Image (spheres, rainbow, N blue to C red):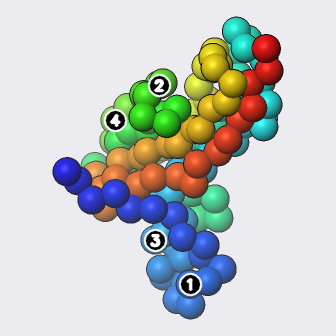
């Protein structure tokens, strides 16, 4: 099983280089805290919050996945150069439109950096109304 890196509060990290490393590799979920069953819910996943990730031929964000607990809901793959290539920095971002079921969602995003492996977001809970 691959090692999964998790976001840690960068306010607690002393070295700026480590803050940059953690932030730019971490996926962040943005969505409403409640949704209606059977209606589309827009869930945006952005790589990095304060720092941008490089886009080189051998170092880029290759994929982002969105899970509800253990169930894969959506996935996107990016080829090298999506954000401009040649070391350009940017924040890979994708919006998934999902249709919620059940009474709640526990959303987690996973992102894969070709150089630094698999990174997991902080889970986001969504209440689903009937």
Disc on the earlier residue, 2 or 4: 2
Quarter-of-image position of residue 107: top right
Among all residues in the image, which is located at the extreme top? 38
Q: Is residue 55 visible?
A: no
How many neighbours does mark 2 have within 10 angstroms: few (below 14), some (14-19), or many (20 or more)?
some
Q: Mark 4 vs mark 3: which is more N-terminal?
A: 3
Q: Where's residue 55, x and y in %?
A: 40, 52
Q: Identify the element where label 4 is drawn.
A: loop
Say above or below: 73 vs 37: below
In the image as oriented, which residue stretches furthest toward the left?
1
Position of residue 80 measured from the top left corner of the image (x, y, whole percent): 33, 41
Sequence-wise, the earlier of marks 1 and 4 is 1
Q: Is residue 106 left or right of residue 60?
A: right
**Any part of residue 22 in sight:** yes
Return the mark for residue 79.
4
**Separation of residues labelled 1 and 4 (CA atoms):** 31 Å
Q: CA distance from mark 3 to mark 2?
A: 26 Å
What residue is pinned by disc 2?
A: 74
> Residue under circle 1?
13
Question: From the viewer's perspective, is 11 left or right of 22?
Answer: right
Q: Which residue is mark 3?
A: 21
Element at label 3: helix
């Amino acid at each position: 099983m691959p090692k999964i890196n998790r976001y840690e509060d960068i306010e607690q990290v002393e070295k700026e280089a480590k803050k940059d490393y953690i932030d730019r590799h971490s996926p962040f979920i943005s969505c409403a805290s409640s949704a209606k069953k059977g209606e589309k819910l827009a869930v945006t996943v952005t790589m990095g919050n304060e720092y941008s990730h490089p886009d080189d031929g051998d170092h880029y964000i290759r994929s982002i996945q969105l899970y509800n607990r253990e169930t894969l809901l959506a996935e996107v793959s990016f080829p090298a150069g999506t954000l401009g290539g040649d070391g350009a920095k940017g924040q890979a971002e994708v919006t998934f439109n999902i249709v919620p079921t059940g009474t709640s969602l526990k959303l987690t995003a996973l992102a894969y950096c070709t150089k630094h492996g698999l990174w997991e977001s902080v889970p986001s809970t969504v209440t689903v109304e009937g």
